[in-house]
Amino acid sequence: QAINFFCLYGAYVLGKHWVATPLNGFWKYFLRPRKNLQARYGEGTWALVTGAGDGIGEELCYQLAQAGFHIVLLSRTQSKMEVVAKNIESKYGVKTKVVTYDFSALSAASEGQKFEALMKKETGDLDISILVNNVGMGWMGSFHTTPSLKMFNLLTVNCASQVVVSRYFLAQCAKNRQGKKCALVDYSSMGALGNNPPPKLIQYGATKAFNLWLSKGIAAEYAHTLKQNPGSEHNVDLDVLTVHPASVKTQMNSGRYPGTVTAAAHAKGVIDKLGWDSCTYGHWVHAARDFIMDYEPFKTINKMQWAARRRAFLKEKAAQEAEQAAAKKIEDDKAAEQ
Ligand SMILES: NC(=O)c1ccc[n+]([C@@H]2O[C@H](COP(=O)([O-])OP(=O)(O)OC[C@H]3O[C@@H](n4cnc5c(N)ncnc54)[C@H](OP(=O)(O)O)[C@@H]3O)[C@@H](O)[C@H]2O)c1
């Protein structure tokens, strides 16, 4: 009987992983239609996208505008956002609003208050139903050699931005959108999944783990609140979608890793999942990659890729040292001539 039980259990585990999961993935990534997002979050409402001037953020703006939302672009470089805003308006006929803000300023509570005041002034009269916390920066290198400004910017741009913008958005939803559905899309990364922090990317990975955990925490808290206090004015009826992509070719990522996808294809995949799922890779290539990489021998090959990345960095370091030595030699020669 015990043997029968183990056989049945084994068949269940294998069937779930090798049959049900791929079939479910095929349904999600290839067959399932996109939700009617205007009907779900409100006709003529606004979507607020951080880091909207470039890369994934720019493409998410196009996807949301195509779905009929007016777009608030919130990022650092005004000129880039103005170009994107113009494209959106001429292509999709929706309204746009450009708000310029440098998230690296968010290093104190007073800066958070200034940010909220700016948002109230710029967007207080807009009915924002969707927030995309996309803004982020990367850094690759040894932990102890990271320039200290870079280290703090990673915390402010990647983590503090998510806290402050989400807080502003959820307060607005609780105040102005009672009984209406809202959506929060948070950007984490595949580097934050599993138990292997990626070498040479550990600070970036840690900030992305923060993004993942805050996103999942907000999803749990607001789902719970809705059930516990039906009708309370503090409730927010919220869809939360946590995004953890692998390699997407953008300004941040030169795209030399296997399985790199375009920002446009990734962004389409993300908006297709909105209202359906609580987390996504965005593109099927990244979902398939993670599914396969979980198993031997690919797990080991994946670890070898980390080793390759380490070797690449050692090479980079050697080149840097050679450059410094050459510069020193020029200085020494000059000193000797004098
Ligand atoms: N690309 C990937 O392979 C990948 C993989 C996993 C996760 N992600 C995540 O996806 C998100 C978007 O990444 P991406 O590849 O699209 O990056 P990106 O091409 O570098 O674009 C980042 C955007 O954020 C803005 N930004 C950067 N620092 C800012 C600051 N201090 N204040 C305000 N705005 C700032 C940039 O503005 P400027 O134009 O002024 O620079 C730009 O518009 C990030 O959260 C990232 O962690 C990316």
Image (tube, rainbow, N blue to C red):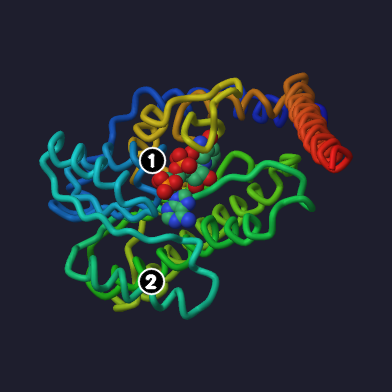
Query: In the rendered structure, which disc, 1 or 2, sits on the residue that comes first in sequence?
Result: 1
Q: Which residue is mark 2?
A: 115
Q: Is residue 160 left or right of residue 144?
A: left
Viewport quadrant of the N terminus = top right
Q: Residues within 10 Å of mark 1 (few under 14, many from 20)?
A: many
Q: Point out the residue furthest to the front here.
A: 338
**In front here: 226 or 299?**
299
On the image, the x and y values in percent for residue 8 come to 70, 28
On the image, the x and y values in percent for residue 239 come to 37, 54
Q: Secondary structure at mark 2?
A: helix
Residue at the image point whose x is 38% and y is 35% from the top: 267
Amino acid type of the residue that numbered disc 2 sits on in the rendered structure: Phe
Q: Is ligand 1 closer than 8 angstroms to the Cβ of mark 2?
A: no
Q: Secondary structure at mark 1?
A: loop
Viewport quadrant of the C terminus = top right
Amino acid type of the residue that numbered disc 1 sits on in the rendered structure: Asp
Q: Is ligand 1 closer than 8 angstroms to the Cβ of mark 1?
A: yes
Q: Which residue is mark 1?
A: 54
On the image, the x and y values in percent for residue 37 come to 23, 44
